[in-house]
Image (cartoon, rainbow, N blue to C red):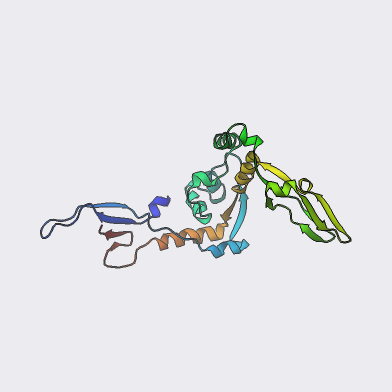
């Protein structure tokens, strides 16, 4: 359905030979007209709902579930700004495992450290060390000193940070891909109509029809 909404271009296959011959033309989809979603839409929760993709779930399945038609998968692709949907979705566990082992090596995937991450350390109601900060091995192996509200405390770095293996890192990155935006029904209809309107040509020197224009190369 998406491709049926993209307008066409009619372009030269060869230069015009002056003065009597004509160009041959071929008609193709104008994929250079990329529709840009207004980024402000994601600042308003009323426009969308967040959805967590399940293992093995495809975009067309989600489209069928929310919009009643699998052919509206392109709406989900555009509103989530997926450049390549094949790599934008989370991998299933088995595919992820094989991918990680191929990328890092079967042993290195599970034994080698990708980075270290901090745990939260509080100074009363204040935070002395924020959780989730990425640190290096030097931090992990060195003492960490902070003020606990009454005195200076020094603890081993490995008590306030922990290692993250290559595999654990890739799992975390894969999980980030699960949350996507689904336009609510009311705004979905408006979005589709706007998309159709935006993909109509305005009259110009190359104009043939609202769905077709001529481009010389």
Indicate whether 101 appears above or below 180.
above
Left or right of residue 215, residue 89 in this image:
right
Q: Is residue 193 above or below residue 87?
A: below
| Residue nearest the viewer, comparing 161 with 194 | 161
Q: Residue at x 70, y 48 (%)?
A: 138
Q: Nearer the viewer, residue 99 or 5?
A: 99
Q: Residue at x 42, y 59 (%)?
A: 196
Residue at the extreme top of the image, as rendered: 106
| Residue furthest out toward the left | 20
> Is 132 positioned to the left or the right of 12 in the image?
right
Q: Position of residue 40 (x, y in %)?
A: 55, 65
Viewer-closest of 14 and 205: 14
Q: Count up the numbered dots.
A: 0
Residue drawn at 68 percent across, 50 percent down: 135
Query: Who is closer to the viewer here, 44 or 135?
Result: 135
Give the image quarter of residue 185: bottom right
Q: Position of residue 175 (x, y in %)?
A: 63, 45
Q: What percent of the width, then of the height, locates residue 96?
A: 58, 37
Against 123, residue 102 (above or below) is above
The picture places residue 79, in percent across and down from the top left corner, at 52, 56
Instruction: Tell me if 193 is positioned left or right of 182 in this view.
Output: left
Outermost residue on the right side: it is 150
Q: Quadrant of the C terminus?
A: bottom left
């Amino acid at each position: 359905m998406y491709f049926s909404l993209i307008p066409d271009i009619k372009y030269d296959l060869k230069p015009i030979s002056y003065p009597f011959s004509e160009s041959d033309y071929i008609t193709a989809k104008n994929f250079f007209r990329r529709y840009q979603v207004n980024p402000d839409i994601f600042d308003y929760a009323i426009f969308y709902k967040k959805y967590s993709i399940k293992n093995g779930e495809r975009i067309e399945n989600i489209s069928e579930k929310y919009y009643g038609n699998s052919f509206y998968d392109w709406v989900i692709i555009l509103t989530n700004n997926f450049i390549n949907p094949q790599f934008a979705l989370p991998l299933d566990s088995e595919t992820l495992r094989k991918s990680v082992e191929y990328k890092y090596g079967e042993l290195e995937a599970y034994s080698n450290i990708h980075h270290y991450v901090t745990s939260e350390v509080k100074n009363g109601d204040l935070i002395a060390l924020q959780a989730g900060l990425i640190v290096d091995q030097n931090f992990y192996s060195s003492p960490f000193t902070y003020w606990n509200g009454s005195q200076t405390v020094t603890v081993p770095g490995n008590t306030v940070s922990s290692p993250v293996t290559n595999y654990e890192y890739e799992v975390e990155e894969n999980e980030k891909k699960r949350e996507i935006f689904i336009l609510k029904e009311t705004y979905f209809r408006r979005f589709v109509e706007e998309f159709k309107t935006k993909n109509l040509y305005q009259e110009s020197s190359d104009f043939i029809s609202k769905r077709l224009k001529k481009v010389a190369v």
